Image (tube, rainbow, N blue to C red):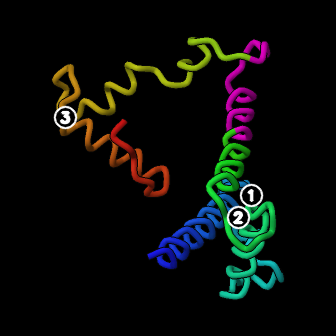
Amino acid sequence: MKAKTYLTEITLVVCMGLATAANAHGARDGSARFEAFDADGNGQITLEEIRARGAARFAEIDANGDGAVSADELKARMDKRADRRIERMIDRLDTNADGALSQSELTARRDPAKMMERFDTDASGGISAEEFAEARKAFAKRRGGQKQSDN
């Protein structure tokens, strides 16, 4: 049981590392993401390059170098990623450059009327449970298939 859990954790970390690498390397067309994996620059990503990238990410997360990733190491990695995302969000949305986001700055890019128009597919003036579920599916699809929590 412990070995299965350990393998699951390793797989999760490697996948998380690959996803983080892909997201961290910029261009919307995917070219920078591709280049991050295509280490030898030959225009193809090989299994060895994927494994090498995963091993490098694992080593980054395994802060103490003991060959295992603890919950604390995972949390530290996730906290670092969250900090970068927060900084980018503030940089992008902080229109008055005060280092904080007001409600108007947070909501300026998401007009509730436009959201209602998009999600209220039967134009009833309200969003039904079915419409809400469809909107969540569409959002998950746009986000790359990530499952949305029920919170």
Image quadrant where one finds the N terminus: bottom left
Helix, strand or loop at mark 1: loop
Vertical relation: 5 (above or below) 89? below
Decide if residue 8 is in sight here: yes
First of labels 2, 1 by sequence position: 1
Query: Which range is magenta?
Result: 83-99
Label 2's element?
helix
Q: Residue furthest right?
A: 40
Q: In the image, 65: left or right of 58? A: right
Side (left or right) of 138 relative to 36: left
Q: CA distance from mark 2 to mark 1?
A: 5 Å
Which residue ends up furthest to the front in the rendered image? Answer: 2
**Residue nearest the observer in this picture, 115 or 85:** 85
Q: Nearest the camera: 148 or 140?
A: 148
Give how far across and how far down residue 57 sits, in percent: 73, 67
User: Which residue in the protein does label 1 denote?
Assistant: 25
Indicate which label's residue lies in the foreground, 3 or 2. Answer: 3
Can residue 35 be seen by looking at this rendering? no
Identity, as a three-letter code, of the amino acid under mark 1: His
Mark carried by residue 129:
3
User: Residue placed at 71% from the left, 26% from the top?
Assistant: 90
Q: Is residue 35 above or below residue 147?
A: below
- CB atoms of marks 2 and 1 within 8 Å: yes
State yes or no: discs 3 and 2 in contact (Cβ < 8 Å): no
Q: Residue at x 33, y 48 (%)?
A: 137
- Callout 2, which amino acid? Arg
Q: Which residue is found at the position 41% from the left and 49% from the top?
A: 140
